[in-house]
Amino acid sequence: MKKYLFSLTMLLCAMIAGAQTLIIVDKTTRQTLPGVIVYSNNPKVSILSNSKGQVDATLFKTADSIHFSFVSYEPIVYSYQKLESMNFKVELSEATISLGEIVVSANRWEEAQIETPNRIEKISKKDVDFQNPQTSADVLETSGYVYIQKSQLAGGSPSLRGFATNRVMLVVDGVRMNNAIFRSGNLQSVISIDASALESAEVLFGPGAVMYGSDAIGGVMDFHTLKPKFSDSTTKLLFTGNAFGRFSSANTEKTGHLDFNIGIKKWAFVTSISYSDYDDLHAGSFGNHYFLRPSYVGRFDSKDSMLINNDSSLQIGSAFSQVNLMQKIYFKSGKSWDIDYAFHYSATSDAPRYDRLYLDADNNGTLDYGEWYYGPQKWMMNRLGITHTQITKIYDQLRIVAAMQNNEESRHDRKFNNKKMRNQTETVDAYSFNLDLDKKITEKATLFYGVEALYNKIGSVANRIHLETHVEEPTNTRYPDGSTWQAYGAYLNMKYKLHSKWIVNAGARYTHYLIKADFDTTFFPFPFVHAENSNGALNGSLGLVFSPNPKWQLYLNGSTGFRAPNIDDMGKVFDSEPGTVVVANADLKPEYAYNAEIGTAKTIGGFLKVDFAGYYTLLKNALARRAFQYNGQDSIIYDGQMSQVQAIQNITAAYVYGVQAGVEISFGRGIGLRSTISYQKGEEQSEERLIYYPKPHVAPLFGSTHLTYVRKKLKLDLYAQYNSKMGYKDLPLVDRTDNASYAKDASGLPFVPGWYTLNFKAALFINKFFSVNAGVENINDQLYRTYSSGISSPGRNFIVALRVKI
C-alpha cells in the first residue's frame, strides 16, 4: 500500500512540475503577447508563445539562460531561477528606438523594413487605441506625415507628398479601394474603413505603381483589419473580445464598438461592429473670425430663411452618424493551405456638405444653397483569399485574392428658395483579382511577381423632385450610366543581396486599361454618343539599400508611377463651383510620374533614432481641369446660369519636392520625445502663360512633437501639432477666389493662417481586462482650418473612453 501511495505522490509531483506555465505580457498594457520567440542556446531549445502568451517553462529548466525576443519589443534574458522568483511572469517593454519593423506594403509580402528602399510609416493597433481617432482619416493623421483635408465632418481626404485623391492609393487587406469615379477633387472614401477594426496600417510614400498599378503616385495607404486567431489546442476553444465606449465633447461623439474572436484548431472567426453618432462640430474660440458660422438657412412655411447663429463657433449642418460591420472566416486546410473570407459593410447617414452651406458667391448676405448634402456613403466588400505555402519550382508562397465591392454615393442640392431638389446617385460595382507569388531563387535572390485584373461598372441616375408637389422630373446624370473601366496588369520585382550590407530591389509592371461609355444627349448635347479610351503604361523601379549594421539604413531609389484616366476624368458633367461647368472629354492619356528619393534611418546607443527622406517627383502629361471649348463655345448655360466651360485635359506638367524627417529620443525612466516634420513644395504649369503656379493639394509645412511618459499600467502623451502659414501667392490659382473657404488678409485676399494646438492624452491600464483613456485636444482652443478644408477643425475637445478586453 505504501508503495502505491509513494508512486501516486511522485506522479502528482511530476504532473505539477510538467504543468508549469510561463506567461508573457506587455509591461504597460498588461495584455498577453502571442508569437514571442523564447529560446536557449544551451541546450538548444526554441518555441513561440501560444495565442494566450504562454510557454511551457519546463522546457528550459536546465538552460543556463533564457532569451525572449519579439518584434518591436526590447529583447531580454533571464535564468530559470530568476523566472521562478518572478512567478513565471515575464513583462516585455516596447522598443521605441528600433529599426526592426516588419512591413507588407513594399512587396505585398512580409519583410523587414530595413531591407526596403522606401519610406514606410507603420501605425499599430496599440497606437490607434491610445490616440482614439474618430475615423480612419484621423488614424492616418496620427502618423505625423499624412495631411488630411475635410470638406465636411463626414470626410477626410489624405494627401501624401503633395498628391491626393485619385493620385494616391487606398488598399484594404490587399484589395484596392480606388475605383473608376475617384475624382481629382477631395475624396471621403477612407472613412468607410472602420478605425476600430484595424490590426495595423502602413503608409508607403512615393510611387508604388510596380506593385499596385494606376493611381499610386503619391503613395499607398495599406490598411490591415483584424485577423482571426486559431486555438492552439484541438480540444479547447479560444475566445477573445474587445469592447469600448467613447465620448468626445467637440461634436458630442458617442461611439460604441465590439469585436470578438472564436478559434478552434482549423477554423477561426472574428466579428466586428461599430456605431458612431456625431452632432454639429464646435470650432475653437481664438483665431480668424472667417472660420466662424454667423448664419445659416432654416426652412419655415415652405420658405428658406436666413437665421442668425447665436453660437457662431457651432458649425450647424455638420452632424452625421456611421455604422461599420465586419465578419471574417479563416480555415486552415492542412499545413500549407489557408482560406479566408471577409465581409465588410459601412454606411453613413446623410452628411451635409458643409463647405457649400455657407457659400455666398454674390456677397449679398444670402447664402447660395437651401440644402446641399451627400446621401449615405455605402461600401460593401466580399473578399476571398487563398494562400499556399510550400516550396515548389515556381513559388514558395502563392496568394489569390478575389473581391467584389459595391459602392454607393449620392448628392442632393437645391439653391436658396428653389423648390426643386436635384438628386444624383452613383453606384460602382468593382471586381478585382490578384495573384501574388514569391520565390527564393538562391540565398541572395528573391523574386516577387503576379498579375491583376480589375473591372468597374458605373451606375448613374438623376432627377429633380418638387418639395411640395413631389413631382419628379429627370435631369442629366453625373456620369454616363452603364459605363465601364477595366485594367489588367502584370508585375515582376527582384530583391537581390549583393552583400551582407547591400541589397538591390528592381521591378517592372505593364498595365493596360480600357474605358467604354455611352452618353445620353437628352439633357446635354454631347458632341458624341459613344466613347472608348484604351492605352497602356509601363513602369519600373530601382532601389539600393546599404546597411553598415543593423542600426543604420541608407537607401536610394528611382521609380515611375502613372494614373490611367477613369470615368470621372472622361465622362463627368458637373458644376465644380458656381459659374463653371466641367464637361466630358474622351481624348485622354495616362499621366506619368518620375520620382527620385534618398533616405536614411539610424539608431544610436538605444536612446536616439533619426530618420530623413528627400524626394523629387515630376508629373508629365498631367491630367488637370482647364478652360475648354464645347461646340466652339467657351461658356454655356448650365443649371440656369451662364458658366465657363472646363474639362479634364492632358495639358500640364507639375513637380513636387520635399523632405520628411523625424527624431526619437529615449531619456530613460519611461520619458521619451518624438518629433516629425514635413516640408513640400509643388508647382503646376499654366498652359496659358507657360509659367508655374503653386500646385493643388501641396500642404504647408506641418509637423508634430510628442513628449511621452510610459510606466507600468500608465501612458501619458503631451504633444503639439503645427502648420505654417500659406500666403495668397502660395495658393493654387483655383483657390484664389473670393468664394474660397479661406480667411482673408488685410487686402481682402485669401490665405491660410498658421496655427498650432496643444494636446494631452493618457491611458490607465487597470488590469488585463479594463483600461481607461482620456485626453484633451486643442487645449488652447485654437480656431483654425487646415489647408484646403471647408470645415473648421474641432475646438477644445475632451475625450474619455472605457475599454474592456477578455
Image (cartoon, rainbow, N blue to C red):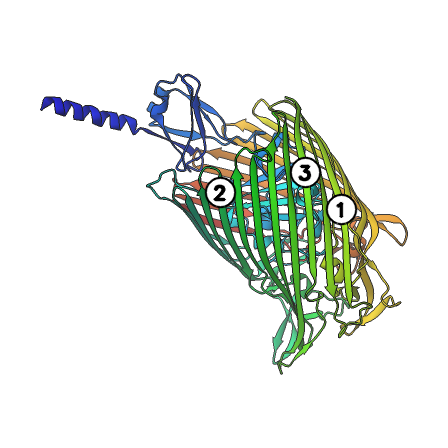
- Give SS at disc 3: strand
Residue at the far bottom in the pictured view: 469
| Residue at position x 64%, y 39% in the image | 449
State the quadrant of the N terminus: top left
**From this viewpoint, is residue 450 visible?**
yes
Q: Is mark 1 on a helix, strand or loop?
A: strand
Residue holding disc 2: 338
Query: Which numbered disc, 2 or 1, marks the residue that appears first in the sequence?
Result: 2
How far is disc 2 from disc 1 in space, using C-alphas?
34 Å
Which amino acid lies under the numbered mark 1 shown in the image of this protein? Ala
Quote the CA–CA distance across marks 2 and 3: 24 Å
Q: Identify the amino acid type marked 3.
A: Leu
Q: Residues within 10 Å of mark 2 (few under 14, many from 20)?
A: some
Crowd band around label 3 with a 10 angstrom C-alpha radius: few (<14), some (14–19), many (20+) = many
Does dot 2 land on a helix, a strand or a loop?
strand
Who is closer to the viewer here, 2 or 594? 2
Using a 10 Å C-alpha cutoff, classify the residue at mark 1 as few (fewer than 14 neighbours), some (14 to 19) or many (20 or more): many
Q: Position of residue 639 (x, y in %)?
A: 76, 72
Residue nearest the observer in this picture, 28 or 270: 270
Left or right, 644 with reference to 125: right
Q: Nearer the viewer, residue 313 or 544?
A: 544
Circle 3 residue: 492
| Disc 1: which residue | 537
Q: Distance between the residues labelled 1 and 3?
A: 15 Å
User: Residue 44: x, y in percent?
Assistant: 42, 19
